[in-house]
Structure formats: structure tokens, C-alpha cells
Image: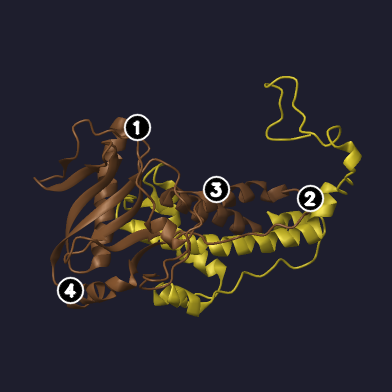
Amino acid sequence: MSAMIEDQHDPLSFPHPALPGALTMAFRESRLREIGLLSYRKERKTFTVRAVMTDNAMPSNCSLEDVVTFQPRTQVFLADGAFPAFKYYSNGKAVLFDLICGPDNTLTHIQTYVSARVPELALGYARAAINQFIDTLTLYTQHPLAIQRLELMSLENGGVLASQITVPTRITTRVAKFHSLRAGGPFLNAESICRQAITSASLTTGFCLRSGDLRAFSKSGRC
Amino acid sequence: MLRRLATDLGVSQKMPKARRLDALKLAQLQFPPEVCALKDTGALFAYYRGLRDAVAHFLLDQSEAAKGSLQFSSTHEYNYAAVSALLLEHLRGELIQLRDYYEKFLSKELHGRYPLWNSDDRGRCHLVICPDDERSAPHDEFN
């Protein structure tokens, strides 16, 4: 993992605090005015939102800079280069996506277009649409594609206006020499699940683990 | 589970209480007022029980608990992420609390004394022992 620290010249801001693992919008302070105006005016606009794609391990205990500067990397080769594609829904509805590749023709981004009044909703609905696109793609290709982050593109200059990220853990643990760890006993499974939940890259799997089995365990502990 | 163990072992010490919630912190994390008003972790788990059941059971059947199909690739993902992060934080605290109780009052009775470790035994004692064949192997047990 790189040792990059937060960019002090143009730091990242959040609309509100969020726990590690939560999805939130982050933006550079230099973009505050543009974001603020969009949120205040609430005029319906068409936003471009692109998902940074990866099939590699994503950093999860790192700086925010590491999250927003993570380079897309996949082994999905777009033989004919970048191309647009539709996902059809019922009653003649469809959503347009662009599959974007780098110089080596490997998929880097999947982009879509969202009509919204506020940036947070544009990001939220774009994620849902892109997820549904990837769900179908993955079923046929079996390629383990994941969204590392979403980027909302500026309507003013086309740069990245805001990112939607999974809040990373930012923790350094200092382990002093210890003699032993105690037997897990009835906690054997709970400890295993807890670790799976903490390290899970999948939000939904994480949710099942965090809210399901652990909760059941905790409850049984009190019954 | 722990309460039953404690009863079986004749341990009378009270189980730890559910952890209190910090209303201010919940508000800062943008949870709705009804969640901020919850008093302890027990109430928090109960509040999200429906969501938990729906997530946990969606692959199994469309029972009462899973009423209304869930769409993981939907805008619900925001909610899943925020709630699961919160529950994980509190569940870790609960587990540590329960484990401390277990270590303090129950563990010795169940596990006996732990062996003393001698550095001269390195490589000779306290090894992971494999059974002779897979079929007779005890399930997930070492030594």
C-alpha cells in the first residue's frame, strides 16, 4: 500500500461523518462551490457518472487519497475498443452505458448518464444502474468485476466533481509481544464471522455477516 | 448460550448489560431520529431486525421475514452499508463484553488450566496434529 497522505492543498470533504464501510460522497474543497450550488438550486440536470472498475484487491485500510486515486485495473479486454451498450428494462425502457478502456484496451470505467436534481442522488442511482449492468455481465462472463468508486463528472469542465467511496478504515495497530490467545469456546464462530465482516469487500455479504449471524450470536448470548 | 453455560456451571455473576447508544454520534452519522432515540444495542438490533431478516433470508424463500423482494443492486446499498457499519461497531463491543465475562467466570471451568509454554518444546509439543485419514478426522478440531 502506498504511503500517500491526504492532499493538504485540496483536501477531501464529506457532507457528514461516516463509519468505515459506509458509502459516502467525497469531494475536493475546491469543488465545494460547484457542489453547493447544485445541491442548493436543485435543478434537474443530466450528470455523467462513471464507475472505476477493478478485478484486483482494493485498498481498505488506507488514506482517503489512496481510495480516490486508485487506478482502475481489470483483465477485461475490449477487443473492439470502447463502445456504448444498453441495458434494456421492461416496457421499452433502456439505460445507456459506455464501456471505456485504457491504451491497452482493458476495461477501466463503465459510465452512465443520470437525470437528477442533487449530486448525491445522481451517484446513488448511477451505482444501482451500473451494478445491475455488471450483474448481468458477470453472469455471462464469470469475471469478478467490482466497482471501486464512482465519479460524478463536473458539468462545468468535465473533471471529477465528487466521488462516491466506501469509507476506508484508517487504523494502525501496534501489537506488543504477547504470550497467547485464549480458547474461542462458544465464540469460535462469532470471532470468525466478525473477521469476515471486517474484511469483507462486499457490502451485501458484509451486511449479512454483520447484521445476521453476529446479531443472532449476541442475542443468544443474552437469552 | 452464555447464560445457559453460566447456569449449568452454577455461576451467579450477572451477565453484562447491553451497551448504551450515543444519540449524538448517531445523529452525526445521519441516522433518523427514531434510531437516535434508541437506548441500547438490544433496541438497535431489534429495530433493524426486519432488514436483517430480509437480507439473510432472501436466497432461501419468500417467507414472512423476507416479504418484499430485496434488490441488492439498488439504492438500498447506501442503507445496507451505513447500517452494517454501525451494527458491526456495536456487535464488536458486545462480543468483547461477553467474551470478557466468559473469560472471567466460565472459561476456567470449561477449559481447565492452559499449558505453560516452554521454548525448549518448540517444534516438539503443541503442534497441529492431523488424523491418519480424512474420513475419521474430527470436525474442525486441533489436538
| Residue that numbered label 3 is attached to | A196
C-alpha distance separating marks 3 and 1: 23 Å
Q: Do the CB atoms of the residues marked 3 and 4 lie less than 8 Å apart?
A: no
Task: Tell which of A140 and A145 is nearer to you.
Answer: A145
Q: Nearer the viewer, mark 3 or mark 2?
A: 2
Q: Which amino acid does label 4 sit on?
A: Lys
The correct choice, above or below, for B7 with respect to A71 in the image is: below
- In the rendered structure, which disc, 3 or 2, sits on the residue that comes first in sequence? 2
Q: Do labels 2 and 4 share a chain?
A: yes
Q: What residue type is labelled 1?
A: Gln
Q: Nearer the viewer, mark 3 or mark 4?
A: 4
Residue at image position (82%, 59%) is B10
Q: Which amino acid does label 3 sit on?
A: Gln
Q: Quadrant of the C terminus of chain A?
A: bottom right
Q: How is the image coloured?
A: by chain
- Horizontal side of B31 relative to A134 (left or right) equals right
The correct choice, above or below, for B140 with respect to B49 in the image is: above
Read off the chain for label 3: A
Note the chain letter of the brown one: A
Judge whether residue A223 can be spotted in this image: no
| Residue that numbered label 1 is attached to | A142
| Residue that numbered label 4 is attached to | A42
Q: What element carries label 4?
A: loop
Q: Residue A79: horizontal and vertical position, in percent? A: 22, 30
| Residue that numbered label 2 is attached to | A180
- In the rendered structure, which disc, 4 or 1, sits on the residue that comes first in sequence? 4
Note the chain letter of the yellow one: B
C-alpha distance separating marks 2 and 4: 58 Å
